[in-house]
Amino acid sequence: MSKLIINKKKLFENLNILNNLLEQKNIKWTLVTKILSGNKIVLNEILSHSIIKKIHSFGDSRISNLKTIKRINSKVTTMYIKPPSIKDVTNIVKYADISLNTSLKTITKLNQEAKLQNKIHKVIIMVELGELREGVIKENLLNFYSQCFNLTNIKIIGIGANLGCMYGVEPTISKMKLLSDYKRKIEKKFNIKLKYISGGSSINLSLLNKDLPKTINHLRIGESAFLGTDPITSKRFKNLNTDVFNYQANIIELKKKRSKPDGKISTANIGHTSNTFSKSETYRAIVDFGILDVDADQLIPKLKTVTFICTTSDMSVYDLKQNIPINGKKKEVGSTIKFIPKYMAVAKLFLSKYTEIEIN
């Protein structure tokens, strides 16, 4: 069985670094935990650590994961980070202290449910800034807010935006200034104060050393906390650890073979191949994971001499070239091939029941 290994020391180092960085900028932040797919063991490590006292809230896009968080530590603040489905309002109010919203109909239903549960449910209203995913369009924004302030069990605590997730639209200073301007207009129009401007996600961290408006006082961060990378460049952000997660697969066959298949190629294949052929024979290693476990293109081999050949439902093939000894030892059946997994690889591996999870 392949194995995903989590280095908790490096994870907590990342959380501390982000805490210190954001605290200097007077920015609160939500740790987005959806990459963990509700894994109780890892969440328990995080939620029992003193670090949580410095984190504003814990966000996820799955109600079941928020339920797990609340069961582990009922005192932490939770945030549902996508517009809720109306059919889920009961559990949203029950397990999420805050939700991000774009629909008046949904907010009205949340208000009705909050009354039934004798709660005040907090809401951040998301605004469209160019990504064309969730968000109220600017022409409707003031009217939208006007219809929310009279809901007795809903407390509007802020305005927010999401960029970078669908088309990859980058957050810019001008877009953040626009979001701040919307906040000012709402406060002036309705003579109120909105507590937060939730400017975005890990993709916004690159703006911290620029003239980011001081009104941006909340971010929702997942990728940079867990992987240590800047989503725009995919490179290391500041001095964060980029190897919190390591993935290793077991070699179940290792033989010298040619690279080009022999025979008539049909449409019966279910694999994904690199389609690169060479004339020479090389050592090919079959490892014990496949498409059902993780997408191979989301895995970066630690050794430069290892290259991807093919992945099928439950096995993958890697080219080891001439299998030159490393530290005096060649790869063999029973050896492992190690990878640095990207964000979607980690998320999918946590979902796979065929992957062993180890924390050290």
Image (spheres, rainbow, N blue to C red):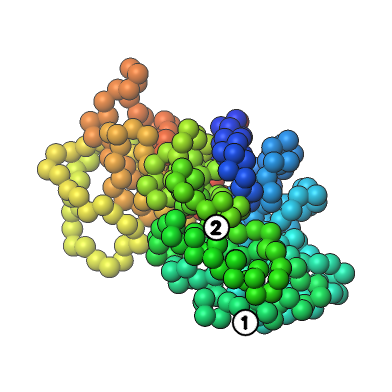
Residue for point 42% across, 38% down: 236
Q: Horizontal and vertical percent for residue 261?
A: 20, 52
User: Mark 1 or mark 2: which comes first in sequence?
Assistant: 1
Q: Which residue is mark 2?
A: 199
Residue for point 58% across, 77% down: 141
How packed mark 2 is, by other alpha carbons closer than 10 Å (few <14, some 14-19, many 20 or more), is many
How packed mark 1 is, by other alpha carbons closer than 10 Å (few <14, some 14-19, many 20 or more), is few
Location of the C terminus by quadrant is: top right
Does residue 9 appear left or right of residue 46 in this picture?
A: left
Q: Does the rendering let one see residue 83?
A: no
Numbered disc 2: secondary structure:
strand
Numbered disc 1: secondary structure:
helix
The alpha-carbon separation of the residues under discs 1 and 2 comes to: 21 Å
Disc assigned to residue 151 = none
Q: Which residue is mark 1?
A: 143
Of residue 107 and residue 84, the one placed in the foreground of this image is: 107
Q: Horizontal and vertical percent for residue 275?
A: 22, 54
